[in-house]
C-alpha cells in the first residue's frame, strides 16, 4: 500500500473547503468495532499517527465518556482529543464540539465505543457509535477481529452492513491476522459483500496497549508509549491502504454549520482558576475547560505530586479525576502541598473536586494492599480501594441546595466510574446531589459545604453551561467580596 496523497493540497483544500454560511466540509472517518476488544484503539491511533507523520493535521475524537483513550489520541496527533457523547450532548452540541475542534484540522478521526450498535438502549441506537456516525454523517470503517475466522467473516460483515440502512459503512479493516490469512478473508468478503477491504493489522505483541482495571493504562503512565506509536505508524502504511482511507474521509458530505458559543469577557473581570494536572489527575473534558475560559476564567495548572505550593493569585480550585491511588505514596509525601490545599479550602477558596479529586481531599486513602496514606484531610472519613466496580454509567444530578456551581435543582448530566468507596455516607445535611440513573433508584451523593463541592460524578458542563458560569462567578465573588460570600454560602449550607 502506497501513500500518494499530497499533504499540502490537503491543508489548502480539504478543511472547510466549502463554507457558505450554513454548510461546512470536514474530511472525517469513524473507527468502529463489531464489539469491545477488537482493536479499535490500536487502529484509530495507528491511523492518527500515520497521517500525522505525513504532515497532516489530525483532529482526534473519542465517542463516549472516556478519559484514557484520548490520552493516546493526543500523543499520536499532538492535538487535544475531544469527547463526543450522544447521551450527554444534544445533536447541536455534538456538532459544535466537532466543528470547533476540527476547524484547523486536515482530517478528523473518531474512535467509537464498544460495538457499533451498543449503547444505552437494547432496542435503539441511543448513545451508540452508530448514532454518533449518523449525527456527523461520518463514513464508518468497521474493525473486525478475524483471528479465528474464515468464510464466517463475510456473514458477520454483511450483517453489520445491512442492519441499519441509514449508516454509511464505507470500509472494513481486519485485525490480528497474517498476510496469508488476510488474502483468504478478502476472497470470502469479495464474493459476498460490496465494501472495500482497506487492510489489516498483524498479530504483533509490540502493537498491544497495556490494560488495567479502568481500561488501558493512561498514556501519561505508559513508558513504552513512544515505542508503540512508532511501531504502529510503521506497520500500518505497509498493511493498510491509507490513500483509500483518506479518499473515504474526503467523500464525507457537508454538515450544517453549528458555531461554538463565544463571548468577550473584559480582562478586569477575569478570574484565575488553579487546575490540578499531572499523572495522578488528568481526567478532564476539554470542553469543560473551554467553557470556563469562555465564562471569563484563566486556567493555571499545578501538580499535587511535585509542586510545593499552589499557584499565586488563584481565585478557585478545580481538582479533576485520575488515579490518586496509583500515586498515593507520592501524594502523601508532598506534605507541603497537602497543607497548602487544606489551608486554602478551609479559608473559603471555592473548590470543585471530581472523583479522584474527592479521593485526594479525604482524610486517608487506603490502597489495594490495605495501606493507609494521609491525604489533604478536608473531607471526613477514608477512601478505600476495592477489587470491583462500585458505580458505573451515566447519571443526571440535581443539587440539593445552592452550591458554588449551581442553584438548587438545576440539573446537569455526567457519568461515574470508580473502584473505590468512601466510608462517609452522604447525609441529608451535606450531600451535594440527588443522583438519577437509568434503571436505578435515586440516591444521595457527594459533599457540599461552604465553598467546597466534591463528588464522584464527572459532569459535562456543556449539558448545562450555567454550571461553568456559576463556578466562575463564585471565583469572582471570592476575589472581590470574600468575607460576605463565605458567610452567605455557609449559612445556606
Image (cartoon, rainbow, N blue to C red):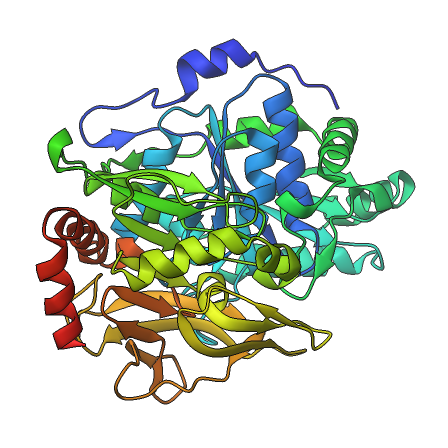
Q: Nearer the viewer, residue 123 or 80?
A: 80
Residue 367 horizontal/vertical position (percent): 66, 71
Q: Quadrant of the N terminus?
A: top right
Residue 448 horizontal/vertical position (percent): 28, 73
Q: Nearer the viewer, residue 409 or 236?
A: 409
- Which residue is painted at 72% across and 29% down in the image? 233
With 400 as the anchor, is 98 left or right in this view? right
Q: Nearer the viewer, residue 379 or 34?
A: 379
Quick check: can you spot residue 390?
yes
Q: How many marks?
A: 0
Q: Is residue 312 above or below residue 398?
A: above
Residue 425 horizontal/vertical position (percent): 42, 87
Q: Is residue 475 above or below residue 397?
A: above
Residue 364 horizontal/vertical position (percent): 54, 73
With 476 as the anchor, is 314 left or right in this view? right
Q: Nearer the viewer, residue 69 or 377?
A: 377
- Which residue is painted at 26% across and 57% down in the image? 350
- Which residue is painted at 47% across and 36% down in the image? 80
Amino acid at each position: 500500500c502506497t501513500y500518494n496523497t499530497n499533504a499540502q493540497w490537503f491543508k489548502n483544500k480539504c478543511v472547510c473547503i466549502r463554507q457558505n454560511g450554513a454548510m461546512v466540509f470536514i474530511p472525517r472517518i469513524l473507527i468502529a468495532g463489531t464489539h469491545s476488544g477488537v482493536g479499535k484503539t490500536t487502529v484509530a491511533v495507528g491511523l492518527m499517527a500515520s497521517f500525522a507523520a505525513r504532515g497532516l493535521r489530525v483532529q482526534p475524537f473519542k465517542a463516549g465518556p472516556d478519559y484514557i483513550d484520548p490520552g493516546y489520541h493526543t500523543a499520536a496527533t499532538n492535538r487535544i482529543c475531544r469527547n463526543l457523547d450522544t447521551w450527554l450532548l444534544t445533536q447541536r452540541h455534538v456538532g459544535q464540539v466537532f466543528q470547533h475542534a476540527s476547524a484547523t484540522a486536515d482530517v478528523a478521526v473518531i474512535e467509537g465505543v464498544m460495538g457499533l450498535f451498543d449503547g444505552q438502549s437494547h432496542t435503539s441506537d441511543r448513545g451508540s457509535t452508530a448514532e454518533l456516525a449518523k449525527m456527523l454523517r461520518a463514513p464508518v470503517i468497521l474493525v473486525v477481529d478475524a483471528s479465528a475466522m474464515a468464510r464466517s467473516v463475510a456473514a458477520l460483515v454483511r450483517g453489520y452492513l445491512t442492519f441499519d440502512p441509514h449508516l454509511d459503512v464505507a470500509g472494513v479493516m481486519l485485525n490480528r491476522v497474517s498476510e496469508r490469512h488476510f488474502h483468504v478473508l478478502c476472497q470470502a468478503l469479495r464474493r459476498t459483500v460490496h465494501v472495500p477491504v482497506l487492510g489489516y493489522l498483524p498479530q504483533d505483541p509490540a502493537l498491544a496497549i497495556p490494560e488495567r482495571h479502568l481500561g488501558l493504562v493512561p498514556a501519561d503512565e505508559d513508558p513504552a508509549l513512544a515505542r508503540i506509536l512508532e511501531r504502529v505508524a510503521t506497520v500500518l502504511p505497509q498493511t493498510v491502504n491509507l490513500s483509500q482511507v483518506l479518499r473515504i474521509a474526503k467523500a464525507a458530505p457537508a454538515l450544517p454549520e453549528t458555531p461554538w458559543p463565544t463571548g468577550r469577557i473584559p480582562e478586569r473581570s477575569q478570574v484565575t482558576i488553579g487546575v490540578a494536572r499531572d499523572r495522578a489527575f488528568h481526567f478532564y473534558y476539554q470542553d469543560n475547560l473551554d467553557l470556563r475560559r469562555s465564562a471569563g476564567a484563566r486556567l493555571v495548572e499545578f501538580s499535587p505530586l511535585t509542586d510545593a505550593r499552589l499557584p499565586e493569585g488563584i481565585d478557585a480550585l478545580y481538582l479533576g479525576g485520575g488515579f490518586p491511588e496509583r500515586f498515593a505514596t507520592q501524594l502523601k509525601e508532598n506534605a507541603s502541598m497537602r497543607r497548602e490545599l487544606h489551608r486554602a479550602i478551609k479559608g473559603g477558596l471555592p473548590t470543585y473536586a471530581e472523583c479522584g479529586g474527592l479521593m485526594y481531599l479525604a482524610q486517608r486513602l487506603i490502597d489495594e494492599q490495605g495501606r493507609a496514606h494521609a491525604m489533604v484531610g478536608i473531607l471526613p472519613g477514608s477512601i478505600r480501594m476495592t477489587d470491583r466496580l462500585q458505580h458505573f454509567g451515566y447519571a443526571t444530578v440535581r443539587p440539593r441546595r445552592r452550591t458554588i456551581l449551581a442553584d438548587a435543582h438545576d440539573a446537569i448530566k455526567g457519568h461515574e466510574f470508580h473502584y473505590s468507596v468512601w466510608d462517609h455516607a452522604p447525609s441529608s445535611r451535606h450531600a451535594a446531589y440527588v443522583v438519577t440513573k437509568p434503571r436505578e433508584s435515586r440516591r444521595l451523593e457527594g459533599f457540599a459545604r461552604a465553598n467546597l463541592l466534591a463528588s464522584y460524578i464527572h459532569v459535562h458542563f456543556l449539558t448545562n453551561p450555567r454550571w461553568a458560569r456559576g463556578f466562575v462567578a463564585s471565583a469572582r465573588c471570592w476575589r472581590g467580596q470574600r468575607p460576605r460570600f463565605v458567610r452567605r454560602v455557609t449559612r445556606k449550607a
